[in-house]
Image (spheres, rainbow, N blue to C red):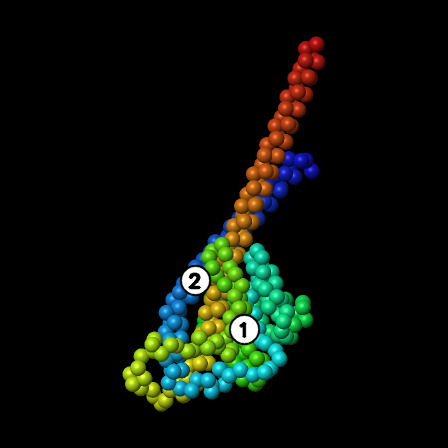
Amino acid sequence: MSVSRLIRRRIKSAKNIAQITKAMEMVSASKMRHAQEQTLAGKPYAEKLTTMLKTIARHTNAAMHPLLQTNDAPKSLIVLISSNRGLAGGLSTNLFKAVEEFMKPKKAEFVVVGKKGKEYALKFQHTIIGEFTDLPDRIRFEDTLPIAELVMKAFLDGEYSDVHLVHMQFVSTLSQKVKFEQILPPPAEEIQQPADLVEAKSEYLFEPNSTEILEFLLPYYIAVEIYHTLLDAKASEHSARMVAMKSASDNARDVMNGLQLVFNKSRQAAITTELIDMTTATLSVAG
């Protein structure tokens, strides 16, 4: 195969790669925007739910609720939220490094959300008590309920001293950071509100009563926290993949440009050689 033909083949391959990565970049950008819109749309609801929980907690003996009590179990439970696919730069690597650091002083078991998290846990022989690797890109609240039910049951059974959500938090399109959040038992500041920020007790009438409302509201609050964390993790995943694919597209174009220069020089050299041969032949005939 001639050098020119080989270079043309490489240029075509680089062009195909650039087209594929550009398409993946555009798809990831669209999915990222959708995940961000879902997160922003649900934020006022989550804030109001938190305010309501704090208000009801002040009208009950909230500390007696089983989900708010601490225990002496020797293990923690980590809900590790990761992606199902790669091609997202160092997103998964950074997440798993942070988890390893977090686990050094304690013993922990895992609920894994996403195939990458499952692969990590199996590779390092961590105990997995639940796995959710088939969640859709467009997550619904109903998709998170089995996760919430599993972690609450494990905590109520006294198997774990605490439960943490771990995911890559969306900071900006170009930046994501690891976030650890304790959801069980919820930190005191999550459900307690200073007296001067809560309306007078007489302004509220609870039906059937505040204790029963708290019984329903607290598990629901945990599920909402997991749901919004999953949305945030999705936004981070898609933004990281969009940036990675843009970088890949740019690199492919650079390779194409470099190969095109080599191809042009090769053609120029071939033409020059042919001209020299023709000139030499002409001079020989004339002589």
Residue 185 image position (x, y, % from top left): 50, 79
Q: Quadrant of residue 154?
A: bottom right
Compared with 245, 234 (above or below) is below
Depth check: 99 or 141 in front?
Answer: 99
Image-based side of 128 in relation to 32, left or right = right
Q: Which residue is mark 1?
A: 164
Q: Which numbered disc, 1 or 2, marks the residue that appears first in the sequence?
A: 2
Neighbours of disc 1 within 10 Å: few (<14), some (14-19), many (20+): many
**Number of callouts in the render?**
2
Depth check: 282 or 108 in front?
Answer: 108
Image-based side of 213 in relation to 112, left or right = left
Disc 2 marks a residue whose amino acid type is: Gln
Residue 200 shows up from this direction: yes
Tell me what residue is drawn at x 63 percent, y 31 percent. Answer: 266
Compared with 66, 196 (above or below) is above
User: What is the residue that sits farthest to the top in this orientation?
Assistant: 287
Disc 1 marks a residue whose amino acid type is: His
Indicate the secondary structure of the residue bearing disc 2.
helix
Residue 34 image position (x, y, % from top left): 43, 62
Compared with 129, 254 (above or below) is above
Compared with 77, 30 (above or below) is above
Report the Cα–Cα distance between label 1 and label 2: 23 Å
Label 1 vs label 2, nearer the camera: 1
Tell me what residue is drawn at x 43 percent, y 59 percent. Answer: 33
Task: Find residue 36 and name its label.
Answer: 2
Tell me what residue is drawn at x 62 percent, y 26 percent. Answer: 271
Residue 150 shows up from this direction: no
Depth check: 186 or 218 in front?
Answer: 186
Indicate the secondary structure of the residue bearing disc 1.
strand
